[in-house]
Image: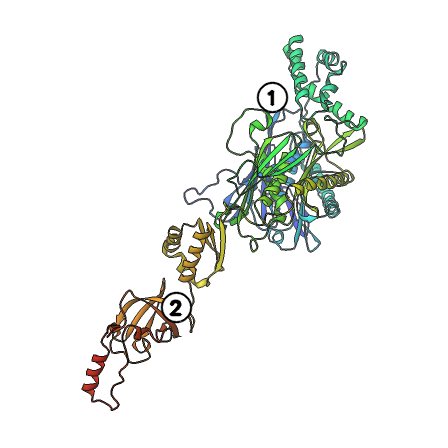
Amino acid sequence: MENAPTFTIDIGGKTLTASFPDLAAKANGSVVLRYGNSVVLVTAVMGPEREGIDFFPLTVEYEEKYYAAGQILGSRFMRREGRPSEEAILSARVVDRAIRPLFDHRLRNEVQVVVTILSIDEDDPDVLGIIGTSLALATSDIPWNGPISAVRIGSNNGAGIVNPTYTEREHADYRYELLACGDGAVINMIEIGAKEVSEEEILEAMKAAQEIHRRLQAWQHDIIERIGKQKRALSFADYPDALRRLFTQSILAPGKLEAALMTNTPGSHALNACKEEWVKEAHSALPPEEARCAGALFEEEADKTLHRLVVEEGKRPDGRKHNELRPIKAYTNLIAPMTHGAGIFYRGDTHVFSALTLGGPGDAQILDTIEHHSTPKRFIHHYNFPPYSTGETGRLGGINRRAVGHGALAERALLPVIPPKEVFPYTIRLVSEVMTSNGSSSMASVCASSLALMDGGVPVARHVAGIAMGLMLWEGKHTVLTDIQGPEDHHGDMDFKVAGTRNGVTAVQMDVKIAGVPLPILAEAFAQAKEARAHILDVMEAAISAPRPELSPLAPRLITITIPKDMIGLVIGPGGKTINGIKDRTGVDDITIEDDGVVYIAGKAEAAEKAKTEIEELTRVFAVGDRLEGEVVRLTDFGAFVKIGPNAEGLVHISEIAPFRIEKVEDVLAVGERVPVVVKGIDEKDRISLSIKMADPEFASRKGITPYHNHTHQPNRDQSRHDRDRYNQPRSRHA
């Protein structure tokens, strides 16, 4: 690695270093990027052209290596990396979404980008992954219209932070987090999580991000000029003249394409039917080598026609105005009575059902990745997109990157209204099932899940709603579209998803198919999204305006108690024997003990109360004066030992049995007998002294034991012993 070209720039008070060693010499382009102690290796490789495909085959892999964190992770039986974590999938999607618009999508050569995390410290490597990918592609011979830059902007107490560390992002006053990619003039990818922040504050953060983009772009251009390779020359054959003439004659001239686009009905059914008819006609009328790209020509012309009609004529495929929503419907639990709560949300032909399940703290998901080690996650949102939602057949089961991404977006949108653990210590899982899809299913899952939370009685502060905005650019003009669907989603230039409450924005995600979007257009999209969100919230609040006052009777009840920290081991027992025994005897679902001594008991109400009683008895700290009832477990000449707790017993001295002299303990007490006692004292060794006579002075008398009162003179020793024996014998009540 000697003499490897190395370049540096200061970003956010830290040095960003790009080194170009010969480590991955066979790759078309590679770079090692370092920021603090976080280091990534990014490689880019382009393979040969793939025949018979009609899409650009780009793949991005994000490899988290356990050694990067300096730990041996994984299960006890599998100490090597397995399938990607959700964090890795989301990071790969971020890189993909940032670089994909800058490729010529007529390219049919497979391109693979691999981001490998070599070292991770306090700085999140996903920003490095984007910048590293940009440098690996831009300095390689792979045709690409980069570079692109990325930065994360956070906010603590109103102060902006450039590329905040993991610790800074966990601060209680952390208000928002913006990950933005762009070239300094436009933004082409956005991820935002916020605690009900205004659109104006987010736009200011985007301006700050663009300032850093401009510096990074200048730095990257300098690197490219110095060490960049000559790009491969690619040529793309134009469509055959005969195919274009036939398309004009059969589809454009009769107005079939415009009619298929502007049906005044939702969906793409007419457009798909028109395309299918055209492809059949082309293959029947032309030689195979001329007809093979008939489908691509149709998509290209449909894209142009839709843009022109929307921007120049103000039309939309389903007949709506540019800022008009599809019909909205909202319902609470109608079809799943055994769930703990459910919501159903309709947005035109997009229908989503969300189910709520509540569990104890022990049901939290444990994250064990290089970014989060043994971290419990108590709020989970999952998103499912079965093939029947689009009227298709396909494989069920498993998850894909899209499902992970949409689930994470909805989770981020809802998280700001989830009550803290101190208020509502339950583990919360939401599952959104897309029953019918025609665009904006991720934002519909936000709405359905918000309904489910309130239906289940989770004390959320207010509803969260989401909306997807679109964009059409045509000959220097543009139109922002509210609530995109069908052809607008497929052919549009932007998918701008905004979720939030009446108080502000909670999540944003933006993808584009163009080089990027300038801030004034994003500001316009924010304004339209806010107006649409208010209308959606009206409909949701009409269905349910506040959380139900009680949890579902099917949900577990959660009881919280606190025990001394030095008694945690006592409750758990050797190998968990004690705590598992409590679970088995009481029938509770789960018992979780935190390091600070807080105990969460989850289960049916009666079972949870029984477990609570057992734990309280097991961990009771006794004090002088406590009145108890215990079981006599052992007799001695000097007294009796009484069990007053599962692991506690005390001594009742013979002098504390009755308010008069007792000759023999067994005259009054028997093993197994339950007796009232008062804690008389606790010595420095925590030995407990008990008293029966303080608890019940008549206890011995009721058993027929009475004091010796018949002699006024002092008897001799032998006579005294004889009299005590005689008078202290057990007697019948009727004697």
Q: Where is residue 184 in the image (x, y as percent from the top left)?
A: 74, 41
Specify the farthest residue to the front: 734
Helix, strand or loop for disc 1: loop
In terms of image quadrants, where is residue 300?
Answer: top right
Residue 191 visible in the shown view: no
Q: How crowded is mark 1: few (under 14 residues within 10 Å), some or many (20 or more)?
A: few
Helix, strand or loop for disc 2: strand
Residue 403 visible in the shown view: yes
Q: Mark 1 points at which residue?
A: 53
The foreground one among 271 and 478 is 271
Q: Does residue 88 appear to the left or right of 102 in the view shown?
A: left
For the point 60% across and 43% down, the residue is 411
Q: Name the residue under label 2.
A: 628
Q: How crowded is mark 2: few (under 14 residues within 10 Å), some or many (20 or more)?
A: some
Is 734 rendered above or below residue 17? below
Is 470 rendered above or below residue 291? below
Q: Position of residue 320 (x, y in %)?
A: 75, 29
Q: Nearer the viewer, mark 2 or mark 1?
A: 2
Q: Where is residue 380 in the image (x, y as percent from the top left)?
A: 55, 44
The foreground one among 323 and 546 is 546
Q: In which quarter of the image is the N terminus?
A: top right
Residue type of the residue flagged with mark 2: Leu
Q: Does residue 656 appear to the left or right of 188 in the view shown?
A: left
For the point 79% across and 32% down, the residue is 478
Q: Which mark is residue 167?
A: none
Q: Which numbered disc flags the more N-terminal residue, 2 or 1?
A: 1
